[in-house]
C-alpha cells in the first residue's frame, strides 16, 4: 500500500525549486497615518530568492531574524503565496495551485516546527497524534493499519519499543522525545520534502545531536530537507549546502564546507567571524560588526548590506549585486552577491 | 570541600561565595523538588565566571538564591556571602543591603523588562536615587556616562524602550544594573532572543565592562561556546549539583567529569571536527530520592560504585575539581 504514487524523479529535476520568489506583507498603517490617508508600508520579507533542493539533499538556510528564512520555507510549502516568482515541485509549476490539488500537493511535503512543546496537542496521546494525518489524508485505512504505520514511524525516529510510547501524553515525554514524536507525525505520509524550521533550537545540547542525526538519516534515505537555522555550526555540520540570507536575499550559496572555510560575501565572513569556537586556547578577538539588521520596511539602497559592510566602496550604495559565481567554473555551485566577488 | 582556588582567595574577598546551598520547592499536592542540592561556589573579584548546564540543572535557581530573588515558599539553606558579608538576614531588609550596590542582575529577556512608559535615562537614574541617595543632577550625569559606556549615545537618554532595538534595550538593562557600581553582576542568559551578531556585541561589551569597571561577572547560560570564549572559569551543573569546576582552558583540554566531556562532544562548533554525539537518556527527576551518582544512568564510564555511592566535588588538579569516582584515573583517549 504505497502512499506516494508520484513517478520517480529524473536526476536533473530538483525536488523543489523557488524561482525569484517574493513574499510580500502589507503592514497596517498607524491610526495617525490612516487619518492622513497614508497607506501602510509594504515589506518584502523575501525579495527575489531562487533556491532548489534535490532529493537526498539538505540545504540550510542561515540568517538572523528578519532575514526571511522562515518565510522562504513557508513559500516552498505553499503556506505563503508568493507575490512574484514561481514555486516548482518535482518540475511542475505549483505557484497557483489551489483547492483540492493544493491539498494533494501538500501530502508529500511537511513542516517540522521549532517548538515541540507547542506543536503537539497536550490532550492527545501519541498514537492519536500520529494517526491524525492518515485520518485526514487516507480515509480508506482501517485502524489496525493506522496503528501499524504509527508504530513504524516511532521506530523510524528511534522511539523504541514503539508500544511504550503509543499511549503516552506529550507531557510524559522529554523535550527530545517530543521533537521525535513531532518528526514521526510528519513522516506519517511519507513526505519527500521537509522544511525543518529551527528543529533543535528549543532543545538541550545533549539531545540536539540525536535529532540532527535523525534528519541526516532521512536525508540519506532520499528525502529533500530545507533546514532553517540561525546556528552556523549546526548548518556547517549537517547540511550539504548552505544559503546565507540577509534582509530577504540570498547573499551566498554553496557547499557547506566551502562556505564556512572560505566565505566570499562580507556578511557570511562576519557571521563566521563572530561564531565563537569551543577551544579557549584558539581564542581570537572576534571581529564584530556594529549595528543591527535594518528594518525590512527601510531597505538600504544598492547592496542591502552596504551600511554595515566593512569593505563597502562607492559603488555599493547604488548597485544591487546579483549572485555571481565566486570563481570561474563555480556557476551554480558557489555563488555570492557582492560587487567584490568574481 | 572548598572550591579550589589559585591563588587562594579568602572568604572575605570573594565577590560571591556559596557553601552547601540547598533550594527546595514545595509545590502543593506534589512531592518536594530539590532544585539545588549542595552547591559550593566561589566567584572571585573581577573574574568572569560561568554557571553552565542544561535546562533544569539548577543554574538559574542557584543565581536567584544568591540574590534572594526566589519566590516565597522556596526553602533556601546554606551559607551565602556577598562581597565578604554573610547574608544572615534573609528578608527584604537584609537583601536590600546587598542588591544593586554589591550585586546586580541582568535577567533573561531583560530587554523586555524595561518600563515601557518611562524614558531609559530615568530608569537608570532611579536605582541610584533609591539605593545611594544620589541627587538627581548627579544621577542623571552618571546615567549618561553609563549609557555611553554601554554604547548608547547619551542624547538617546530620553528615548522610550520601544524606540530602541533589542540589542539597545539589552544594553540599557546592563547600564541599569551597573547604576550603583556593583561588585558582582549576575547575567542570566543575557543574549537569548538576540541575533548572532548582537549576541557577540553584548558578550564583548560585558567583557569590556568587567575590565574597565572591575566587577565580577557570573554568567548563567547553556551556551558552551560563549562560556569558552568569554569567561575565565566555569562550573558545570547537572541535576542540582556542580559536577566540575575549573578554568575554561582546563575544562576544555582536560574535562574530568564524563558529563562535561559529553557536553563538549554534543556541541557542534566550527573549530572541532570530531563526531557529534548526543547523550542518551535524560536527567533524573529531582522530586525523588537519588542513590549514587546522578549521572550514572547516562554515563558510559559508570562502574558499580557509581550506582551506590554519591561522589562529591574533589580536587583533581590545580584549581580543578570534579565530582566523579573515576576523575583521577587516566583520561580516556579521545
Image (cartoon, coloured by chain):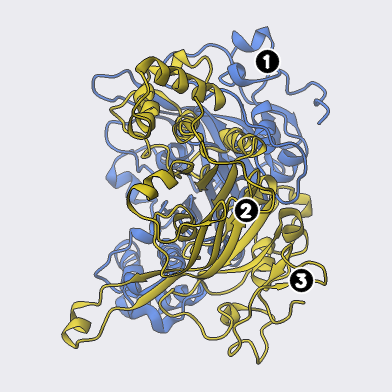
Where does the image place residue A208, in percent across and percent down from the top left? 57, 37
Residues B129 and A15: in front is: A15
Dot 2: element? loop
Which numbered marker is on residue B70? none
Q: Using the rendered image, report if marks 3 and 2 lie on a common chain.
A: yes
Q: Quadrant of residue B277?
A: top right
- Residue B165 visible somewhere in the drawing: yes
Q: Using the rendered image, report if marks 2 and 1 lie on a common chain.
A: no
- Pointer 1: what residue? B302
Which numbered marker is on residue A14? 2
Q: Are marks 2 and 1 in contact (CB under 8 Å)?
A: no
Where does the image place residue A230, in percent across and percent down from the top left? 56, 55
Where does the image place residue A290, in percent across and percent down from the top left? 57, 74
- Residue B125 visible somewhere in the drawing: no
Q: Residue at image x 46%, y 31%? A: A188
Crowding around mark 3 (Cα neighbors within 10 Å: few <14, some 14 to 19, many 20+) is many
Instruction: Judge left or right: residue A204 versus residue B91.
Output: right
Chain for numbered disc 3: A
Label located before the other in sequence (3 or 2): 2
Which chain is yellow in the rendering? A
- Pointer 3: what residue? A326
Q: Is residue A39 above or below residue B112?
A: below
Which chain is blue in the rendering? B
Dot 1: element? loop
Which residue is outermost to the left? A35
Disc number lying in front (3 or 1):
3
Residues A60 and A98: in front is: A98
Q: Is residue A176 above or below residue B162?
A: above
Amino acid at each position: 500500500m504505497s502512499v506516494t504514487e508520484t513517478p520517480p524523479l529524473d536526476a536533473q529535476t530538483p525536488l523543489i525549486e523557488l524561482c525569484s520568489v517574493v513574499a510580500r506583507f502589507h503592514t497596517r498603517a498607524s491610526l495617525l497615518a490612516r487619518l492622513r490617508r497614508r497607506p501602510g508600508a509594504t515589506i518584502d520579507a523575501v525579495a527575489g530568492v531562487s533556491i532548489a533542493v534535490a532529493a537526498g539533499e539538505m540545504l540550510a538556510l542561515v540568517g538572523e531574524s528578519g532575514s526571511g528564512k522562515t518565510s522562504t520555507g513557508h513559500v516552498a510549502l505553499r503556506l505563503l503565496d508568493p507575490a512574484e516568482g514561481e514555486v516548482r515541485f518535482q518540475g511542475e509549476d505549483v505557484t497557483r495551485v489551489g483547492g483540492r490539488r493544493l491539498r494533494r500537493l501538500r501530502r508529500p511535503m511537511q513542516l517540522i516546527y521549532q517548538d515541540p512543546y507547542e506543536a503537539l496537542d497536550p490532550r492527545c496521546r501519541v498514537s492519536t497524534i500520529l494517526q491524525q494525518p492518515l485520518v485526514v489524508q487516507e480515509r480508506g485505512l482501517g485502524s489496525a493499519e493506522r496503528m501499524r504505520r504509527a508504530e513504524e514511524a516511532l521506530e523510524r525516529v528511534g522511539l523504541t519499543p514503539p508500544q511504550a510510547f503509543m499511549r503516552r501524553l506529550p507531557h510524559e515525554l522529554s523535550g527530545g522525545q517530543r521533537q521525535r514524536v513531532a518528526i514521526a507525525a510528519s513522516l506519517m505520509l511519507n513526505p519527500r520534502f521537509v522544511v525543518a524550521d529551527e528543529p533543535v533550537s528549543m532543545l538541550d545540547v545533549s539531545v540536539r545531536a540525536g535529532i540532527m542525526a535523525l534528519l541526516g538519516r532521512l536525508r540519506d534515505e532520499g528525502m529533500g530537507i530545507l533546514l532553517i537555522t540561525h546556528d552556523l555550526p549546526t548548518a556547517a555540520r549537517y547540511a550539504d549546502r548552505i544559503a546565507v540570507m540577509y534582509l530577504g536575499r540570498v547573499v551566498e550559496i554553496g557547499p557547506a564546507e566551502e562556505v564556512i572555510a572560505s566565505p566570499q560575501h562580507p556578511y557570511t565572513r562576519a557571521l563566521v567571524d563572530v561564531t565563537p569556537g569551543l577551544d579557549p586556547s584558539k581564542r581570537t578577538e572576534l571581529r564584530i560588526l556594529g549595528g543591527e539588521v535594518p528594518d525590512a520596511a527601510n531597505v538600504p539602497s544598492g547592496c542591502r548590506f552596504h551600511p554595515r559592510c566593512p569593505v563597502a566602496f562607492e559603488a555599493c550604495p547604488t548597485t544591487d549585486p546579483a549572485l555571481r559565481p565566486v570563481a570561474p567554473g563555480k556557476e551554480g555551485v558557489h555563488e555570492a552577491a557582492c560587487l567584490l566577488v568574481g | 570541600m572548598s572550591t579550589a582556588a589559585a591563588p587562594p582567595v579568602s572568604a572575605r574577598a570573594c565577590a560571591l561565595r556559596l557553601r552547601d546551598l540547598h533550594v527546595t520547592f514545595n509545590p502543593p499536592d506534589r512531592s518536594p523538588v530539590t532544585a539545588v542540592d549542595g552547591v559550593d561556589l566561589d566567584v572571585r573579584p573581577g573574574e568572569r565566571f560561568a554557571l553552565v548546564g542544561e535546562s533544569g540543572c539548577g543554574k538559574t535557581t542557584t543565581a536567584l538564591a544568591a540574590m534572594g530573588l526566589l519566590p516565597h515558599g522556596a526553602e533556601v539553606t546554606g551559607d551565602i556571602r556577598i562581597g565578604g558579608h554573610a547574608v544572615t538576614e534573609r528578608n527584604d531588609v537584609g537583601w536590600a543591603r546587598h542588591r544593586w550596590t554589591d550585586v546586580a542582575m541582568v535577567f533573561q529577556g531583560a530587554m523586555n523588562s524595561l518600563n515601557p512608559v518611562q524614558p531609559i535615562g530615568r530608569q537608570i537614574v532611579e536605582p541610584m536615587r533609591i539605593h545611594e541617595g544620589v541627587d538627581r543632577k548627579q544621577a542623571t550625569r552618571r546615567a549618561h556616562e553609563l549609557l555611553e559606556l554601554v554604547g548608547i549615545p547619551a542624547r538617546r537618554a530620553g528615548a522610550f524602550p520601544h524606540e530602541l532595538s533589542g540589542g539597545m534595550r539589552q544594553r540599557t538593562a546592563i547600564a541599569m544594573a551597573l547604576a550603583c557600581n556593583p561588585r558582582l553582576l549576575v547575567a542570566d542568559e543575557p543574549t537569548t532572543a538576540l541575533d548572532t551578531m548582537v549576541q557577540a556585541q553584548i558578550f564583548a561589551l560585558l567583557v569590556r565592562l568587567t575590565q574597565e569597571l572591575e566587577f565580577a561577572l557570573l554568567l548563567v547560560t547553556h551556551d558552551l561556546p560563549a562560556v569558552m570564549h568569554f569567561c575565565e572559569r566555569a562550573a558545570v551543573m547537572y541535576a542540582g549539583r556542580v559536577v566540575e569546576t575549573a578554568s575554561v582552558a582546563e575544562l576544555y583540554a582536560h574535562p574530568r567529569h564524563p558529563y562535561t566531556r559529553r557536553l563538549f562532544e554534543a556541541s557542534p562548533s566550527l573549530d572541532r571536527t570530531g563526531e557529534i554525539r548526543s547523550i542518551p537518556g535524560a536527567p533524573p527527576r529531582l522530586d525523588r530520592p537519588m542513590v549514587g551518582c546522578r549521572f550514572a544512568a547516562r554515563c558510559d564510564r559508570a562502574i558499580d560504585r557509581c550506582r551506590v555511592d554519591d561522589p562529591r566535588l574533589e580536587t583533581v588538579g590545580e584549581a580543578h575539581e570534579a565530582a566523579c569516582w573515576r576523575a583521577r584515573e587516566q583520561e580516556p583517549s579521545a
